[in-house]
């Protein structure tokens, strides 16, 4: 079982890529040198880009390069790779995507356990029809501006690996 985990980890590291995106936050720090909370670091342009979901447009370059797909699990920080359980690592059995099942089912309003469960559900139910459904739901959420928490500064908490999935 551990061999499979480390094989997946090595495969993931070998498939790393640079995510192309707009910078929506500044690097302001407190007196101790720690980054300020996200809500205090959003720029005016960044707030607009996030609110309208236009911050994802540069990722089309990643799709053209073959690094990403339109619909799959959203890429997460590289620092999380060694923290995944075998179940959580299954999200990497497909390319990362701009939108996915977790995004249309809560985005930043759900916890890590739910996010991983949705990502793995998608891996297990991968089909053209499911992808089209996700694209439709994504467009609907963009139009209604659902699940975008930029006004409150709520972004996903840092993943620590201490979750049950």
Image (tube, rainbow, N blue to C red):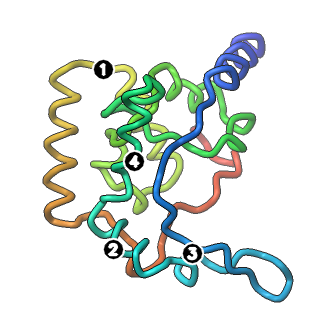
x and y percent of residue 97 in the render? Answer: 39, 35
Mark 1 → mark 3, Cα distance in angstroms: 33 Å
Q: Residues within 10 Å of mark 2 (few under 14, many from 20)?
A: some
> Looking at the figure, which quarter contains the N terminus?
top right
Of residue 32 and residue 49, the one placed in the foreground of this image is: 49
Relative to 64, residue 161 above or below:
below
- Badge number at residue 48: 2
Circle nearer the viewer, 2 or 1 = 2
Mark 1 or mark 3, earlier in chain? 3
Mark 3 → mark 4, Cα distance in angstroms: 21 Å
Whether tag 4 and tag 1 are in contact, CB under 8 A, the answer is no
**Residue that numbered label 1 is attached to:** 126
Mark 4 or mark 1, earlier in chain? 4
Mark 2 or mark 1, earlier in chain? 2
Mark 2 → mark 4, Cα distance in angstroms: 15 Å
- Badge number at residue 38: 3
Q: Tag 2, which secondary structure?
A: helix
Relative to 8, residue 42 above or below:
below
The residue located at (70%, 25%) in the rendering is 13
Mark 2 or mark 4, earlier in chain? 2
Please indicate whether residue 76 sits to the left or right of residue 8 in the image: left
**Residue that numbered label 4 is attached to:** 58
Mark 3 → mark 2, Cα distance in angstroms: 15 Å
């Amino acid at each position: 079982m551990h061999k499979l985990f480390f094989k997946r980890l090595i495969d993931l590291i070998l498939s790393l890529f640079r995510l192309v995106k707009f910078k929506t936050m500044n690097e302001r720090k407190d007196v101790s040198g720690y980054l300020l909370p996200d809500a205090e670091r959003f720029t005016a342009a960044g707030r607009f880009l996030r609110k309208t979901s236009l911050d994802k447009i540069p990722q089309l370059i990643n799709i053209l390069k073959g690094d990403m797909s339109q619909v799959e699990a959203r890429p997460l920080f590289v620092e999380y790779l060694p923290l995944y359980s075998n179940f959580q690592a299954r999200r990497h059995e497909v390319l990362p995507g701009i939108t996915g099942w977790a995004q249309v089912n809560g985005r930043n309003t759900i916890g890590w356990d739910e996010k991983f469960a949705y990502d793995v559900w998608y891996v297990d139910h991968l089909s053209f029809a499911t992808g089209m459904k996700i694209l439709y739901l994504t467009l609907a959420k963009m139009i209604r501006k659902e699940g975008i928490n930029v006004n409150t500064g709520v972004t996903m908490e840092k993943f620590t690996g201490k979750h049950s999935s």
